[in-house]
Image (cartoon, rainbow, N blue to C red):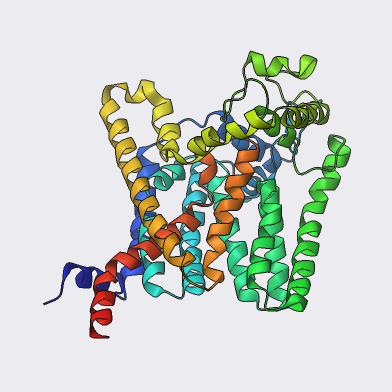
Amino acid sequence: MPTLRDRLTSLVNGRNFVPFCLASGICLRLLWVSVVDPDQVSDFKWYFLRAVSIAHGTGYSVDGIRTAYWPVGYPGFLGVAFYLFGPSVFLAKCLNILLYAVLILLTYWVGKRVFRSELAARLTVFFLSFYPNHVAYATILSTEILFAFLLMLGAALLMAAQERTGWLLWAGLVWGMAALTKPQAIFVPIIFLVALAANPRSFLKAAVTVYVTLIVTISPWLIRNHFAVGAPTLSTNGGIVLFIGNNPYATGGQIWDDHVKSLLGDLGTDNMFDGKEVEREARAESFAIRYIKHHPVRTVLLWPRKLVGLYASDVDGFYYSLGAMRAAWAHQAFVYLGFRIFGELYYLFLLTLAGIGMYSVLCRPSQSGKIGIYIILYFTATYLLFFAIARYHFAFMPWVVLYSGIGGEQLLQRKRREVTEGLE
């Protein structure tokens, strides 16, 4: 008689399982977008306004002052869409849904390629399709979905390339776009190039092709910034971010109060778009580096707090789409609380399965299955150097969920392995 594990395995392996999950995930996000319509605040409003500015031909500027403070990738992406179809918050949300749907399919393909497991890849599709916090993000105009999509697309192209120059050129283009969205992406291709290279010659060819294309892709923006703000940089907030995470008042999270601002003297202000971006970043970076050199112990002691800030919670999407609208939802606070509880439990479930999956992969001799672990470690180390908030783990959560798929596979097939081992 079939057991529950057998029935679940049969269900997941069914012909219609992946299309059903994908369609359900899209419908769930469309429903969320139609019901929840938050004001775009803080960074999200800024991205929208800069995209409108780009679409209208007035450039990447604030009140007529050209800026490079935040990377241009996401506002530029929206700007092109707004130029073609007209500025619309709803259009941006639909693009979020479209990008995430393709992200799910890319993750499915990468999972099969890396782990050689159809079952694990299908479980990953299920987990991502119904991921509560990621559903909530559909209604937020943030960089996270686009960046997660570009990370997975770049990975898929490198895996499919197999030394073919055309594919490597496309991969370099995508990684260049990812670097324009979040500069820390610039070093991520190295992980794949090292892990996938068959020999030193193939590594050299792939690395040169990808990085030459990447540099060509970002060069127009570097040249623009050289003339617009005085420095050939991807953005002018890297030094600020380093400073926020490394100063006497640092908490491990994002804090920009009067105490912190005072450390920058006359450049400490809430107005980052005053034409002094490069000077402010240089002063902030210099202060942060000196602080790290002279206070290495306190710097390291902040790492646990940064880890907590990065991984302890996974309901920021609900906060930005519901919690920040307390006036509208005050009479239904239990709804917001319910979403938060469900989201945290789902996240804990995924992390538990991911832990099982990572242990399983680490016990195997194959290196390709460890690529996701290297990506997670790379981004974690990056945020330990700077500062960390829950929003920052969004982009590499699909890689975590791939290991959740492996963990789910381990649980579903445990009995089968036990029976096989008993027969042996």
Point out residue 114 in the picture as x, y percentages from the top left corner: 51, 71
Query: Total label count?
Result: 0
- Give 339 or 225, whichever is nearer the viewer: 339
Identify the residue shown where x is 40% and y is 74%: 118
Q: Which of 233 and 330 is in front in this view?
A: 233
In the rendered image, the residue lying farthest to the bottom is: 424
- Quadrant showing the N terminus: bottom left
Residue 245 in view (yes/no): no
The picture quadrant where one finds residue 63 is top right
Foreground pick, 42 / 27: 42
Please tell me in which quadrant of the rendered image residue 212 appears.
bottom right
- Residue at 76% over, 44% down: 234
Looking at the image, residue 136 sits to the left or right of residue 166; the answer is: left
Look at the image and tell me whether residue 404 can be seen. yes
> Image height check: is 337 above or below 400?
above
Q: Residue at x 56, y 30 (%)?
A: 253
Q: Position of residue 127 (x, y in %)?
A: 37, 57
Residue 2 quadrant: bottom left
